[in-house]
Amino acid sequence: MFGLARLRIKSKVMLVLLVVSLGSAATMGLLTWQRARTILTQRIFDQLTSVRAAKSAEIESYFQFMYSQVETLAEDRMVVSAMREFDQAFDQLNAATEPLAPAWQEAVRTYYRDEFFPRLSNNIDGTPIFDIYRPGGRAAQVLQYRYIANNPHPVGSKDNLLQAGDDTNYNTIHGRYHRIFRNLVSKFGYYDLFLIDHTTGDIVYSVYKETDFATSLDTGPYARSNFAEVIDKVQRNPEPGAVQIVDFAPYRPSYGAPAAFFASPIYADGQQVGILAVQLPVDRINNVLTGRQNWENEGLGKTGEVYLVGADLLMRSISRFLIEDPTGYKQALRDVGTPETIIETIGRLETSILLQSVDTEGAEAAQQGKAGTQIIDDYRGVPVLSSYAPLNIKGVDWVILSEMDLAEAYAPLTNLQGYILITAVILEFLVTLIAVAAANSLVRPISLLVEDSHKIISGELDQTELQSTTQDELSLLVDAFNEINRSLREQQSLLATKDRENTALLLNVLPATAAERLANGEALISDHTRETAVLVASLEGLTELSAKRSVSEVTTLLTELFSAFDEAAMGLDVVALDRIGELYFAVCGLSAPRMDHTKRVVDLGLEMLNILQRFNNRYNPNLKLCIGIDAGESIAAVIDTKRLNYHLWGETLAIAHQLNRVAESNTIRVTEEVHDCVRDLYTFRPAEDIEVSEVGRLTSWVLYRGGTGRPSLDDTVREIEVIVSLGEEPI
């Protein structure tokens, strides 16, 4: 109440109308938005759950179909006969006593070295060693030579060889069955099909003839693979009709690609004769979950996806974002702290399967057997609407998640927010007009006086003159305001004049930037810049000139000369500093950085030589200049604000000072940094080495200035002395 009592009548009227209208609009807008958000969230969750359920059913049906296929194939008479014959032929090859041709062994080694290992190395860490992958038994060596190393078909097409062309029983059997098995693999979409000796784990037959062909899964190079794991499951549970499955894992014979396996025992006359196994391709699962990359047609929008996660919380299907935007996907992984080695592997293999970690609330809940929906952060750290559930697949602990970015899901809410905001703005505008009209009708006489008073407060002294329409105390107040206005105008004029005088004084003793900072009230004025160029010049011949001419004449000449130097520096945007005796100091890039600060200072040095030559020609004082230039780090500050002294120090100044001392008359010497910067613009030649105190022996260059006017590359010999010098020497 106390606060309202202090408000003006006009403000009270406007405040009441605005608060009532704004409160009503805000309440209605908030309720509308919350209701819309609830409805939209539930609709998106329902949509995601529907897609997830459809994909779950399709995946579960596919695996059930695979179970039935493998079980049926294991019981097929043709498969049983093939298993017996291949197993017998394989044993015959092992039992043979004739030695293997060294050329065969070398051919196998060459295949691994030139064909298999280079492809494998692209997908795994480390360097493969042949002794680890070497086929063990005699049969393995013979078969890998005839059907892999000596196979005329390229890698990926070894299955096109029907017969190896020898007189062995295995060759005959292979010619009889291979075409049939190859058609089965093609028809049912397997990656590969295998016949395995259940006692030894030997792969006696495979369709595609990768490097696991003819090796033993019990003792061979792939005895620790997930393929060996599924065969072990069958060996430990050889019940007829039982089908075992093993989860996806990198499989080296397939060059490290993810592979899952189904396996079932083969029986004949009540006796187990072998094991049938098929390798499951990951492409089929990816096609199901991505809808063959038609996410939008399946109701997943621009950011929705469905993917599988294993018990290890690693993906079992590929990420949509890796497919559509690999660069953005990898950057998102970096943002959430994914190790760079994992990101590089994902990029190299172009897959997120068995690489992308999904340690999210949805994945963990599904692994616990729960199905539901939540708003969570996904594996990219992006807020999403997530629908999750476990999969009903015997032998694997997989979960399925259907998700959509929160930003896309709530895009309609953004539009609604805009509509509510526009409506509220229009409403408030109308209410404001009404409030202003009502308030003005009540307080217009007082408002006129307040408005005119605000003009004086805002500084509109020249334009404001209050007018009184009454003869009461208000008239006296108006006269007082007008008198104050006139007094303020006079004070303002005096302050402006003093400010101009002070600014001119500061510019005479300080650089423009330092003067501006001092005028703005800075107590500590300093500059520390790594990219500056410093010039130190000394004037020779002053003693002789003073002996020949009067003090006033010498003063006049030097004033004209140094003024010309200052004008040249100003034209090149180089700051001229204090002159101490015959020394002249200038710097560029300190308070106002310049890309070409070094060239500007070199040009200033050349122009100073030109000025001096014209000066000598005109007045014949016979003066000479020695100039040293360095580029690098500099420090400057106003040390004494009462006396307004602007000091420069640092290694760059010290080196330029030393260069000035050793420079010959009417020459310019610079450091290596200067030489490297402007060597394409000027001609250089090295000078003799010099000895610098506390530094040692240094190399130098000299820029000669011959003739009159500014030197050119064609007619002027420039000698630039480049010195690498350390240490400081204050002015």
Image: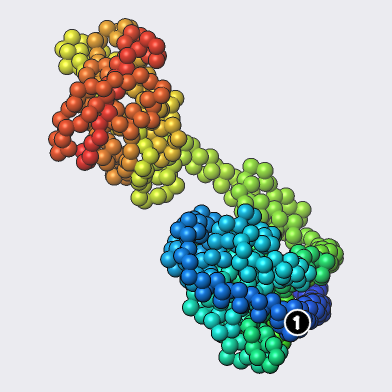
Tell me what residue is drawn at x 61 percent, y 77 percent.
87
Query: Is 340 placed above or below 679 here?
Result: below
Query: Is 267 placed above or below 25 here?
Result: below
Looking at the image, residue 294 sits to the left or right of residue 343; the answer is: right
Element marked by disc 1 = helix
Tell me what residue is drawn at x 57 percent, y 57 percent.
150
Tell me what residue is drawn at x 16 percent, y 32 percent.
697
Residue 248 location, x and y as percent?
61, 76
Looking at the image, residue 427 sits to the left or right of residue 698; the answer is: right
Q: What is the crowding at mark 1: few (fewer than 14 residues within 10 Å), some, or many (at least 20)?
A: few
The residue type indicated by label 1 comes to Arg
In-front residue for pair 521/168: 168
In-front residue for pair 43/400: 400
Coloration mode: rainbow
Query: Is 529 placed above or below 365 here?
Result: above
Q: Quadrant of residue 360?
A: bottom right
Query: Is 171 placed above or below 481 here?
Result: below
Residue 227 location, x and y as percent?
58, 77
Q: From where the camera sits, is residue 352 visible? A: no
- Write down the residue under mark 1: 77
Looking at the image, residue 139 sits to the left or right of residue 393; the answer is: left
Quarter of the picture holding the N terminus: bottom right
In-front residue for pair 305/99: 99
Residue 105 location, x and y as percent?
47, 60
Tell me what residue is drawn at x 75 percent, y 78 percent.
78
In-front residue for pair 688/725: 688
Q: Quadrant of residue 589?
A: top left
Quarter of the picture holding the C terminus: top left
Q: From where the camera sits, is residue 453 visible? A: yes
Residue 506 location, x and y as percent?
39, 37
